[in-house]
Amino acid sequence: MTIQKTETSRLENIDFDNLIFGKVMSDHMFAMDFRDGVWGEPHILPYGEMGMAPSLSALHYGQSVFEGMKVFYGVDLRVRVFRPHAHYDRLMRSCERMCIPQFEYEHFISAIHTLIKLDQAWIPKERGKSLYIRPVVFAIDYSLGLKPSLSYRFMVLTSPMGYYYPEGMKPVRLMTSGEYARAVRGGVGDVKTAGNYAASMLPFKDAHEKGFSQILWLNAYDNATIEEAGVMNVFFVLNGALITPALSGSILPGITRDSVLTLAREKGIEVEERTITIQEVFDAGRKGVLQEAFGTGTAAVIAPIGLIHHNGDEIVINNNEIGPMTDMFYNDITAFQYGEVEDMFGWCEIM
């Protein structure tokens, strides 16, 4: 691997007390290109702009996939990456769906290892903060022809972050998606590709202007079945049972979602992966059996949900406070990430 170190670090200019998600990039980035049927030489270079032509294929046809991961400073001062192989597996599924050539896990993890060693000082040491990792693969042909590209670039960026939502761990407010749909079965809703997120920006903008944190996505076919909460998977606690929408082909198989389900089953909590409608949730809320709701995702980890708005009606969940199960899963998962408990599932890779 060729390594070109930055001549001047930007680290001393970073305000680690006021980190905004995705705004500040660490000193270095990784790049590796696919050309003539093979992945080429891997490179580490200073973070900065890339030259490109306006005909870059990914700009026009969205042939681009990505992942989101985190690195943590543990209580033992060791550096941990949370579930890297699971993220690699999902990235490869995304590549396959978008006609992007796959590559070996060794390329993936060696890129992350090398970046972390170079920019280890960028990892925040305060609990609740981490170094976010963004692997991304995109088409780099210069062509306006509508076809799979013949060349691609795999890159890894890193960025220090605090809480994903400005509210921190305060419960978020959601509104249902109304006329908008996130994904359909047979589409690309179950992979992390750029177009999924571009299509969600207008609904997010509308929700924010109305005072809500995110969208509660309903199924495109019936506008009634719940799928995701913004860019997160979603969970409900009804009568002590943990319920989440089943992976139906239009829902992203979240790594944090899987972590919550694994922990719940280990603890003997009743788990249901099934269809759940917005009507069922509202009925449960009115009957007093909807105890908690929360979203899960790499960036937020666990985001408690305090209110849901649907067709002019609203329900408040757990008095707009963090519920005990929500709090438990957040504390349990972050305890693994910061090395505070034994890693019984082998989730963390120590750098």
Image (spheres, rainbow, N blue to C red):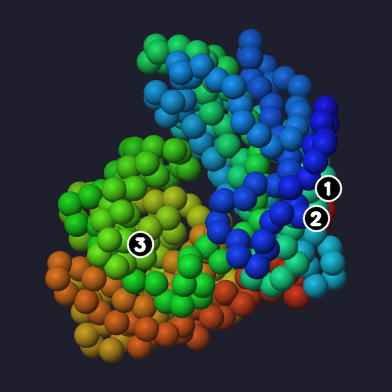
Q: Earlier in the sequence, mark 3 or mark 1?
A: 1
Residue 87: x and y in percent read 61, 48
State which quadrant residue 71 falls in: bottom right
Tag shown at residue 214? 3
Image height check: is 79 above or below 31?
below
Helix, strand or loop for disc 1: helix
Mark 1, other Cα within 10 Å: few <14 / some 14–19 / many ≥20: few
Query: What residue sits 29% from the left and 82% below the top?
Result: 316
Instruction: Tell me which amino acid carries mark 1.
Output: Lys
Q: Left or right: 136 with respect to 182?
A: right
Point out residue 313 in the picture as x, y percentages from the top left corner: 16, 74
Residue bearing mark 2:
121
Sequence-earlier tag: 2 or 3: 2
Distance (Cα) linking label 2 and label 1: 9 Å
Please report the residue visible at 82 percent of the width from the left and 36 percent of the height from the top. Answer: 7
- Vertical placement of residue 292 versus 7, above or below: below
Q: Is residue 116 left or right of residue 19?
A: right
Does residue 149 appear anywhere in the picture?
Answer: no
- Mark 3 Cα within 10 Å, few/some/many (few <14, many 20+)? many
The answer to whether the residue labelled 3 contacts the one labelled 1, judged by CB atoms less than 8 Å apart, is: no
Q: Residue at x 44, y 38 (%)?
A: 194
Q: Residue furthest left?
A: 312
Query: Secondary structure under badge 2?
Result: helix
* Residue behind mark 1: 117
Kind of residue sitting beneath label 2: Ala
